[in-house]
Image: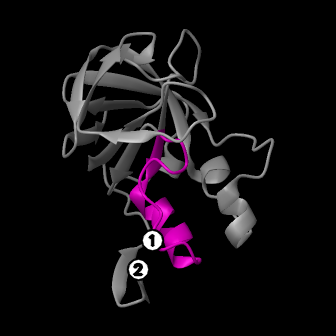
C-alpha cells in the first residue's frame, strides 16, 4: 500500500512499496567530500571503485550511496518542500524499491551495472543542516551503501532490479 501526504497541494509518496523493480530518478556527484552533490543525467560506474568523478569513490565498501525518493519525501513533508535529489549526498536516488529494507549482500542491477549492498544507514557524526531545520534526517536510517561488482553506465530513468 502506498500512502501519500498532502502538503501545499502537492501529493508526495512516503511509503515505499516492496517491489523488486524500480527506477533511477536522479544521479548525483561531487568533486570533494563535504560539498553539495550536483545532479547529472548519466554516470559511469567502475568496478570496485564507484562513480567516475565522485569524491566518495574508492576501494572501500561505501563506493555508491542510494536513497529512495520516498525517503526524501518524508523530509519534504516535514517542512522542507524544496529538497532536491542529492541533498543528502546520495549518489543514486531511487523510486519504487524499498531501499532501507534491502539486506547486506543483496545484489542490485541497473542496466548492465551490478552493485552489492554493503551497509545499511550510517552514523551521523555532525548534525547536518537538514537535521537542524526539522529535527530529523533520513539518511542515517534509510540510506544504503554498495560496492560496484560490474562496471557500466546508468542514466536517469534506468530500471533497477533486485537480483
Which residue is tagged 1? 14
Residue 71 position (above or below residue 50)? below
Task: Judge left or right: residue 134 versus residue 148.
Answer: right
**Element class at badge 2:** loop
* Mark 1 in CB contact with mark 2 (< 8 angstroms): yes
87 falls in the magenta region: yes
SS label for mark 1: loop
Residue 3 tag number? 2
- The crowd level at tag 1 (other Cα within 10 Å; few <14, some 14-19, many 20+) is many
Quadrant assignment, res 91:
top left
Q: Measuring 59% from the left and 77% from the top, which residue is drawn there?
A: 78
Left or right: where 111 falls relative to 135: left
Residue at 80% x, 45% y is 126
Residue under the image location 65 percent in, 52 percent down: 141
Residue 53 is situated, as x and y percent measured from the top left of the image, at 40, 19
User: Along the polypeptide, which appears first: circle 1 or circle 2?
Assistant: 2
Residue at the limit of the structure toward the right, as seen here: 125
State the image quarter where residue 96 is shown: bottom left
158 to the left or right of 73: left
Which residue is located at x 47 percent, y 63 percent?
Answer: 83
Examine the image and state in which quarter residue 44 appears. top left
Instruction: Count up the numbered dots.
Output: 2
* In the image, residue 63 lies in the stretch drawn in magenta: no
The spot of residue 85 in percent (x, y) is 41, 53
In magenta, the rendered stretch is 66-90
Q: x%, y% of residue 111? A: 19, 29
The quadrant of the rendering that contains the N terminus is: bottom left
Amino acid at each position: 500500500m502506498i500512502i501519500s501526504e498532502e502538503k501545499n497541494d502537492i501529493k508526495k509518496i512516503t511509503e515505499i512499496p516492496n517491489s523488486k523493480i524500480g527506477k533511477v530518478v536522479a544521479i548525483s556527484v561531487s568533486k570533494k567530500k563535504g560539498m553539495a552533490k550536483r545532479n547529472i543525467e548519466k554516470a559511469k560506474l567502475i568496478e570496485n571503485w564507484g562513480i567516475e568523478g565522485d569524491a566518495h569513490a574508492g576501494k572501500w565498501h561505501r563506493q555508491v550511496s542510494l536513497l529512495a525518493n520516498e525517503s526524501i519525501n518524508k523530509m519534504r513533508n516535514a517542512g522542507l518542500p524544496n529538497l532536491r535529489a542529492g541533498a543528502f549526498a546520495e549518489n543514486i536516488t531511487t523510486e519504487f524499491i524499498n531501499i532501507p529494507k534491502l539486506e547486506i549482500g543483496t545484489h542490485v542491477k541497473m542496466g548492465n551495472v551490478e552493485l552489492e549492498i554493503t551497509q545499511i544507514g550510517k552514523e551521523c557524526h555532525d548534525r547536518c543542516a537538514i537535521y537542524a531545520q526539522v529535527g530529523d534526517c533520513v539518511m542515517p536510517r534509510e540510506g544504503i551503501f554498495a560496492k560496484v561488482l560490474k562496471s557500466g553506465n546508468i542514466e536517469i530513468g534506468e530500471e533497477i532490479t533486485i537480483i
